Image: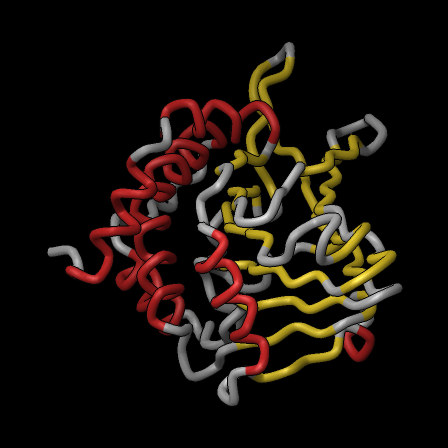
Amino acid sequence: MRDSGMTAFDTDLDRFDWAAIGSQLDAEGYALLPGLLGADTARSLARQVDAPQARRASLESSGLGRGDLHYFDAGLPAPLEHWRAAFYRRLAVHANRWNEILGVRAHYPAELGEFLERNRNAGQHQAQSHLSRLGVEDYVALHQRNEGELVFPMQIVALLSEPGAGFQGGEFVMTEQRPRMQSRPLVVPLKFGDAAIIATAERPFQGSKGYYRVNLKHALSRVRQGERIGLELSFHDAP
């Protein structure tokens, strides 16, 4: 049974063409969800970086760039937890399809709660979903969030600040490495309140001789002016 608190967001997600989203994920490794978050919702989420339960982690201390990440170790705020479950329910279908294409026997359960229980049984307890806050000259280096035995192949990113008015720079970028080829750069054109589904680390690619794996990383370019606040939702926990 669905949590009654998820009804409105489920309706928001239902307006998107999920078959087309699956096709875009197959072709590019990401799928844009324009205008998913209204301005008031985006600003409300952005203010969560100052919530007392948000744990600040410096990007410099981990060698991942410059700026701050804000984690919710005690659990995501209620709206984000509902949204994560609603997204997972739709993306598990595409994740299982990717596994079938690549010949991976693992099967993702239909509901997020069961998948997170499997995470705990595998020793994966560390929350990865977070808000990022980048000021002038801050950036996030290319990276993947694929630690652990159980990794969900997709995650969600969203922009909670307004480009131009609130900040300049800070573009969301990805690279894709195909065997025996140079890395392919991608810029995901996020606007204020937009979200995107991105490949976590690998995805299937159909070449002339069948499907093979391609490797993806993501990053945020240097912020030139203002302050950029973004959201990243992961469906698996880290060890």
Residue at 42 percent of width and 23 percent of height: 20
Residue 198 spot, x, y in % from top left: 56, 43
Locate residue 225 relative to residue 88 in the image: left or right: right
Numbered disc total: 0
Pick the front one: 114 or 41: 41
Give the residue at x 61% y 28%. Answer: 28
Q: Camera-side residue: 54 or 164?
A: 164
Q: Point out the residue furthest to the front here.
A: 165
Outermost residue, top direction?
208
Q: Position of residue 165 (x, y in %)?
A: 72, 53
Q: Position of residue 119 (x, y in %)?
A: 40, 67
Estimate the x, y position of residue 207 in percent, counting from the top left: 63, 16
User: Which colour style is shown?
Assistant: secondary structure
Left or right, 186 with respect to 118, comes to right
**Quarter where residue 160 is shown:** bottom right
Q: Residue at x 56, y 22 (%)?
A: 211
| Figure quadrant of the N terminus | bottom left
Residue in view at x 27 percent, y 47 percent: 10
Outermost residue, bottom direction? 52
Determine whether, in the image, residue 212 is placed left or right of residue 173. Answer: left
Height in image: 149 above or below 216?
Answer: below
